[in-house]
Amino acid sequence: MIKIHNACKRYSGVNVLDNVSIQVKKSGILGLAGPSGSGKSTLLRCLQKLETLDDGSLECNGKTGFMFQDFQLFPHMTALENIVYAPNLSDRSAKRRRNNEKRAREMLKNLGIESKMYEYPESLSGGQKQRVALARSLMVNPDILLCDEPTSGLDVATTMDVVSLLKSVGETGVAMIIASHDLDFLTKISDRIILLREGKIVVDIKTEEHKNPVIYLKKYYVDD
Amino acid sequence: MISNCYYIGKGLVFTLQLMFGGIAIGVILGTLLSILRYGRVLGMLANGWVSLIRGTPLILQLSIVYFMAPSIIGVRLDMLSAGVISFGLNSSAYVAEILRSGVESLPKGQFEAARTLGIPDFYMWKDIILPQVIRNIWPAMVNEIIALLKETTLISIIGGMDIMRRSQIIAAEQFEYFMPLCIAGAYYYCLVLFIEFIGRKVERRMSHDKNS
Ligand SMILES: Nc1ncnc2c1ncn2[C@@H]1O[C@H](COP(=O)(O)OP(=O)(O)O)[C@@H](O)[C@H]1O
Ligand SMILES: [Mg+2]
């Protein structure tokens, strides 16, 4: 599904990604861990083709969806408009547009924010914005969903909601790559965790094979 | 007094024609300029134009358009056309600058979000970027319109009979400066207040859009 081979990315001479190789064969949730500045966002952005690699290759079979850390909802559109705008561009017929809207409403209902449908982003809480962003990226039917720090700025309870939310998305067969510095969160959600440090992969584990992945991974956060 | 008001007020139409004509050309040309700025060769030309316009006095630009048009394009422009053209050309540079800062002040993520959703460039600009830019630059645009209104008084140097010029004529005829100038001032001030009023109304409309 995804084949990254010796990926390198430099910003002003500094290797932000340093010979990163990752293969993802089947769907599932892959967690990208690592301290802030380790290159997680850059890797996701390269996968989404928002950045180009300086070296190495990257192959991504399937449509990607992207959730930004700061959501980047369109502030002049309601929650519902945010969600249906892109699919409606390609679906010109009234019937298909009605279908899109129906799907969007259902999605918002499942996410528990049906009542916020006609609200503008500025009047939504962080957790609600996130749900809208999730719905928006799912509306284009991605095979792979890329999430950058989906729990940043959320309280504990909302984080738990995000865990079950993303898990249920994963169960529908959408592959996911989730970048986060929060090991507890990643461990709860991922099948596999890759830990980056200064652009290099330092750990690549299957979560189920470890009794306590958090403790195992934490060692790699502290400096030698 | 009443007849003075009336005489000066007859310049209102001319002043408004200059202002609306100027801002119309300014917005159209300014938008075109800010699009051209994304090109390489055309972008350099557009930047040069903006720099030249901003770097020279409006009174000089007006004089060039009015007095030199016959030798450049072979026709003598009437005062209204000369005024609308030079105020429009002048305003285009400022509108282009306002638009540029408006686009630059949007988060890069808005462009990226549109790209990740597969929204084509045209629709991205039309439905995502420009509505936000227009809302953000609206106050600056209202300022530009007010500035342009006040700059239309320069038309008097080529003999245009606007509010300002008419008040000067009365002053010269009646050897009385205070009254006619006050009348002219009142006309301009009322126009500015009216523009501000409309501007605020539109502004509220635009922010109401996102609240209702
Ligand atoms: N556009 C950019 N220009 C310059 N440096 C950048 C840019 N984007 C990221 N970086 C740098 O790359 C490094 C990795 O950033 P990032 O991928 O955002 O890390 P993470 O998401 O793991 O916190 C950081 O040191 C950051 O300063
Ligand atoms: Mg990051």
Image: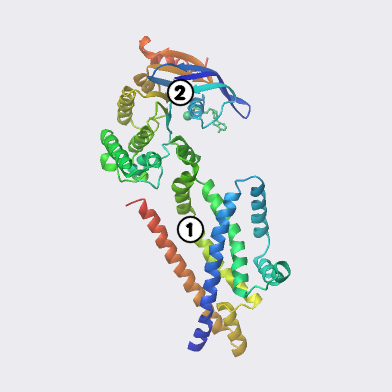
In the displayed structure, does residue A21 sit left or right of residue A130?
A: right
Is the residue B160 above or below the residue B48 in the image?
A: below
Q: CA distance from mark 2 to mark 1?
A: 47 Å
Q: Are marks 2 and 1 on the same chain?
A: no
Helix, strand or loop at label 2? It is loop
| Residue situated in front as seen by the camera: B5 or B35 | B35
In the displayed structure, does residue A30 sit left or right of residue B94?
A: left
Q: Quadrant of residue B66?
A: bottom right
At horizontal 51% and vertical 81% (from top left) the residue drawn is B9
At horizontal 67% and vertical 51% (from top left) the residue drawn is B45
Crowd class of label 2 (few under 14; some 14 to 19; many from 20; radius 10 Å): few
Horizontal and vertical percent position of residue B205: 38, 58
Horizontal and vertical percent position of residue A94: 32, 44
Horizontal and vertical percent position of residue A47: 49, 26
Q: Quadrant of the N terminus of chain A?
A: top left
| Chain letter belonging to callout 2 | A
Q: Amino acid at mark 1?
A: Pro
Dot label at residue B139: 1
Residue at image mark 2:
A61
| Chain letter belonging to callout 1 | B
Q: Amino acid at mark 2?
A: Asn
Q: Is residue A198 visible?
A: no
